[in-house]
Image (spheres, helix red, strand yellow):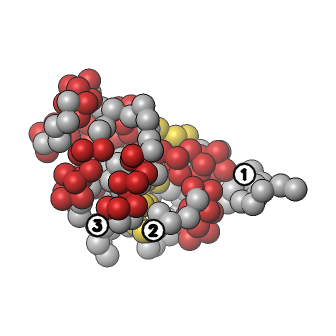
Amino acid sequence: MAKTAQQPVLVIMGVSGSGKSTVAGVLAGRLGWDLAEGDDLHPEANVAKMQTGHALSDEDRWPWLDIIADWIKERTAVGKPGIITCSALKKRYRDVLRGEGVVFVFLQGSKDKISDRLASRHGHFMPASLLESQFDALEAPTEDENHISLCVSASPAEEADEIIERLGLEAQTAHTTGDAA
């Protein structure tokens, strides 16, 4: 993964339940960067389709990906860092989002691990029944994509620490990952 001259826009990616929103929130807090939740940018028709247990088609995803790409470009055009969550399951989806100063952070885990996480999650529009379709669609980032991969076995705080360290970023807030005595 090549470092960029400017502070990057991080695209926190992976299947539903991989921890994108949680890790992105921790990162944004530590770095003091803008954060956008990609799920909030879905057109209403996409949300309704997923709520009824139907996977999105490529045609459903393109307008959503264009909105996310615009958010990214607004920042990279002026050298402003940011963090956005997006499943970005397929290479052709990431091709829409990629650009100078964009780094994909792939949160990966086994179906069993992610399924357990989804079973305990409440209040999200995407049902756990669609997890299989996400794993079926998933194309892991390749060497030609500016990315890092993390296994989702640690706590969100530890995963954020690893991302900051691996990308050579500077946290603006002090923190501890252990319990205070």
**Corner quadrant of residue 155:** bottom right
Q: Give the number of the mark in front: 1 or 3.
A: 3
Q: Distance between the Cα atoms at labels 2 and 3?
A: 12 Å
Which residue is rendered at x = 64% and y = 50% of the image? 31
Q: Distance between the Cα atoms at labels 1 and 3?
A: 31 Å
Indicate which disc residue 151 carries.
2
Q: Position of residue 12 (x, y in %)?
A: 43, 53
Horizontal relation, residue 89 to residue 121: left or right: left
Q: What amino acid is found at the position of numbered circle 1 in the picture?
A: Gln
Q: Nearer the viewer, residue 113 or 56?
A: 113
Q: Give the number of the mark in front: 2 or 3.
A: 2
| Precedes in sequence: disc 1 or disc 3 | 3
Which residue is rendered at x = 50% and y = 66% of the image? 153
Q: Nearer the viewer, residue 1 or 73?
A: 1
Q: Nearer the viewer, residue 107 or 154?
A: 154
Horizontal relation, residue 132 to residue 58: left or right: right
Q: Distance between the Cα atoms at labels 2 and 1?
A: 25 Å
Query: In this figure, what is the number of numbered marks?
Result: 3
Residue contact at pointers 2 and 3, CB within 8 angstroms: no
Residue contact at pointers 1 and 3, CB within 8 angstroms: no
Indicate which disc residue 172 carries.
1
Q: Secondary structure at mark 2?
A: strand
Q: Give the number of the mark in front: 2 or 1.
A: 2
- Tell me: residue 87, above or below residue 149: above
Q: Position of residue 106 (x, y in %)?
A: 40, 62
Q: What amino acid is found at the position of numbered circle 3 in the picture?
A: Ala
The residue beneath circle 3 is 140
